[in-house]
Image (cartoon, helix red, strand yellow):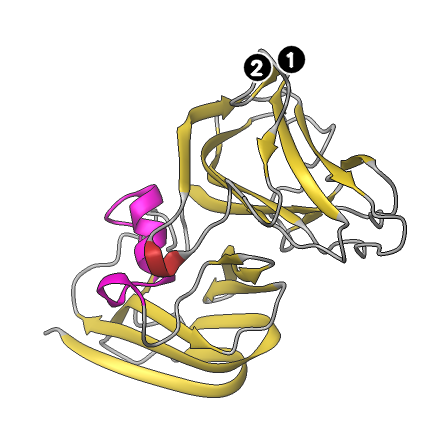
Amino acid sequence: MEALRYVTATNATSVTIAARPGLNVRVLEMWADSVPDKTYMDISIGPRTVARVPLKWGDCLFIAPYSGSMRDESIFALIRDIFGSDVYVEADQSEDIVFRFNNAVGRVHVLYQIHSETVRKELPLRSLQARIPLFHILTHSAAVNATKNYSLDTALAPTGFPTFKDGDTIPAGCRFTLKALAFGSASAGSTKPTAVHVWKREFEILTPETHAGITVDPASNFLVLDVKTKDVFTTPEYAFGPGEKLTANFDATYDGTNAIAANTLALFLIGWFERVT
């Protein structure tokens, strides 16, 4: 038995799809209107958080409104485009699915399917997932108030998730495989970020010869992500193994008057995080 179901909520800080005997749930898509800046969503299945996903940050939009996106696709289609066609939020009859937002969202729409097939809990975005489809959020603890380079030294991660940031190494027994990049850019007056640098050990991704970095000026942000138009920059797969160092920072120019507050800009490292032996 399969059937479609829909739920909506206004001024939402969470949305729950409650467990029901005999019915398993597969989430097909989510849309949202009036999403505040610097908003992300934690996804829980039963007691376990399986993902943190940004929704809107600076000029990046990860979730579409209910109208206006290409083929009416939104955040979960984006996830499947990056990670594969079988990556769904899915729960069995004993598990609630809860979406929690760090900021209240104007209106959220969720389309899901109920079915009686066996849920393979070891697959991504299920409760026993063997590897995590990671949207790793890195921000900066320092205000941008001088023309210089700034460290992306703050990882915004749920409890139990990796917290590697600029200058850190990948934990022992773990691997992160980069698949896509995004940068939420913004300006204050003429103060703005100009380029972001991502290094794997001594290799700078995309600009290894010049070390010029990737342009993230708000007027020409190469790493802007817009789910409405399927605008996402996917990379060759760069695997960061146990003990390998990540360097992540950005250059900025200061106009002498207007500062960009700490934690306003964000780099999103999108890829698989998993345990290795």
**Above or below: residue 173 compared with residue 61:** above
Quick check: 22 left or right of 139? Answer: left
Residue at screen point 57% across, 71% down: 101
Crowding at dot 1, Cα within 10 Å, few <14 / some 14-19 / many 20+, comes out as: few
Quick check: 107 left or right of 20? Answer: right
> Residue 144 in the image: x percent, y percent?
82, 47
Q: Is residue 73 magenta?
A: yes
> Residue 272 in the image: x percent, y percent?
45, 37
At label 2, which amino acid type do we have?
Pro
Residue at screen point 40% across, 47% down: 129
Quick check: 244 left or right of 60? Answer: right
Crowding at dot 2, Cα within 10 Å, few <14 / some 14-19 / many 20+, comes out as: few
Quick check: can you spot residue 122? yes
Q: Earlier in the sequence, mark 1 or mark 2?
A: 1
Q: Nearer the viewer, residue 174 or 12?
A: 12
Quick check: 1 left or right of 158? Answer: left
Outermost residue on the bottom side: it is: 10
Identify residue for label 2.
208
**Above or below: residue 184 compared with residue 149:** below
Indicate which disc residue 59 carries. none
Identify residue for label 1.
202
At label 1, which amino acid type do we have?
Glu
Q: Is residue 272 magenta?
A: no
Q: Secondary structure at mark 2?
A: loop
> Residue 108 in the image: x percent, y percent?
43, 79
Which is in the foreground here, disc 1 or disc 2? 2
Q: Which residues are magenta?
A: 69-89
